[in-house]
Amino acid sequence: MTLTPSEGGRLFLALDGTFTVAWSASAKAERYQYELYPLNSDCTHPHARCNITTARQLTLTPDPVAGNRYTLRVRPINQSCSTQYGSWMQATFTLFSHITGHLIADPNASATLVGNACQDTDLPDLLDATPLTTITAEGQYATYTGAFVGKDASAYSLEVPWWPLFANNLVTLTPDPTLTCSCPVGCRFSGIAAPQSAVNFYLTPLTLSHTGWWQVQGGSVYAGATTGQALVSYIPVDTCNPDSTCTAALLARDTDQTPNSAGVALTGGGGVDTQPDSGNQLGYLREDPAQLSAQGLDLPFKETYAYFYRQYSMGVTPVSEFNAVADDVPEPTTPPTNGRAYFYDGRAGDFTIRQPWHIAAGEQVVIFIDGNLRLQDPLGVEQLITVEQGGFLAFIVAGDMVVEASVGNTDSTNTSANLAGVFIADGWLRIASRGLAAGGDDRFIGEGTFVGWRGVALERDFDDGHIRRIENNTHPVELFRFRPDFVLHVPARMTAPRYVWQET
């Protein structure tokens, strides 16, 4: 009589998660006594199976408590005259299981994780594996690094000691340096049970990645630099042009795609560059055919904090309207004391908004901040400041305006505005980045007018050192959208004409 598996052997679980032990027939045997129990135990173990049968095999489902190493003992029984027992045959064995899958090309990074499996609605193309690609399985009972096997190089099969479902069961892909996993993110599946098939990795070429860029929709843009490059946004022409959702232009048409609605690029004399090639490239300046720009434009007047302050007659000792803590200023609910505009004294700290504001149709809100304006979104509401059609909101800031990295849309395809209004700062207008180490940036979308008289710093980039960098291929990480309705509903004090008196 022989046992299967034999001494010290490996026994693979079937796809249904069961395993079968068997033994050959023994001469004159009418029945068989069997004992199957976890290694270093006996039939008193709660997961032992010990009995007498006329069959010559036993199928069981393992239990995590029992582990993956077993002892099998079988002896024949003859009862022709009296009960006679044959000699025990014994073997120890280890339960193993297979994890199988493919490497699948995902050039558009469209695969998503559903449960423990990645799925893609596109027809998958198998990806040729390279010698630099390895699969590692780290689980409850052992660590194993496997090689690719199969008829095509994209298939792999791992033989691992049996895995029940544990959170620390990991299957990790180390791809070729030119590739990264679109799914699963990080090239790692966690909580994988085995046996299991279709544990597929979807890979995207890293060579398609592009640096972050910005865009203005339905309006013009001005930079006062008189030399060097004043306006720079490198449009990813190769990846944006074939994508129907991407507009390869610094200045795009409005949301209704009205012809000739793309704005004009204006500078104080500095150049405009829309491509990373040497020199100033204007070929992708506007979505409309005419590539309009004006350089050497000098603004004789700058409508700064002081200018609007005088227009609103705020006085020498204005009343600070906001008594709440400076790091969480709520939307005002009562009219300003002077009946014209609100005032905040920056000596109490930065004017920081951390909760949603909503300006309804018919409302006109103007706020003077004698200090810095800081915008944060710790709750992840994304649409932090909204202004309905027919409403108006303006922040006139004597210092800097900083949009923190928390303000943005986590989904790069989301076109909802994070901030709406007129934002004018005498200092810097900064759209801050969380930086590579923190995992790439969210997409910022601003509606209205954004001015930083000292300068504008657009710091964001989808690039997180991994798969998110591919989002730069088809989406501007900062998008500024013109709101023509603000022109219709601007307060009269902000529309006073400027005059120059000059002796002739």
Image (tube, rainbow, N blue to C red):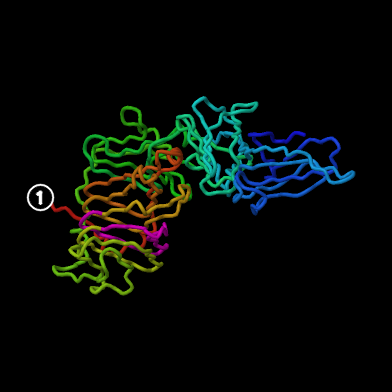
Name of the residue lying farthest toward the top: 131
In the image, 152 versus 380, the foreground residue is 152
Return the residue at label 1. Answer: 503
- Expressed as whole percent of the image width and height from the top left, the position of residue 62 reads 65, 47
Quadrant in the rendering for residue 320: bottom left
Please check the rendered image and state whether residue 464 is part of the magenta-colored stretch, yes or no. Answer: no
- Expressed as whole percent of the image width and height from the top left, the position of residue 358 reads 39, 65
Q: Is residue 184 above or below residue 395?
A: above
- Expressed as whole percent of the image width and height from the top left, the position of residue 52 reads 78, 48
Q: Is residue 107 visible?
A: no
Q: Is residue 280 visible?
A: yes
Name of the residue lying farthest toward the left: 503
Quadrant in which the N terminus is drawn: top right
Residue sitting at 57 percent across and 27 percent down? Answer: 128
Please check the rendered image and state whether residue 380 is part of the magenta-colored stretch, yes or no. Answer: yes
Please provide the residue range marked out in magenta.
373-400
Q: Secondary structure at mark 1?
A: loop
Q: Is residue 151 above or below residue 21?
A: above
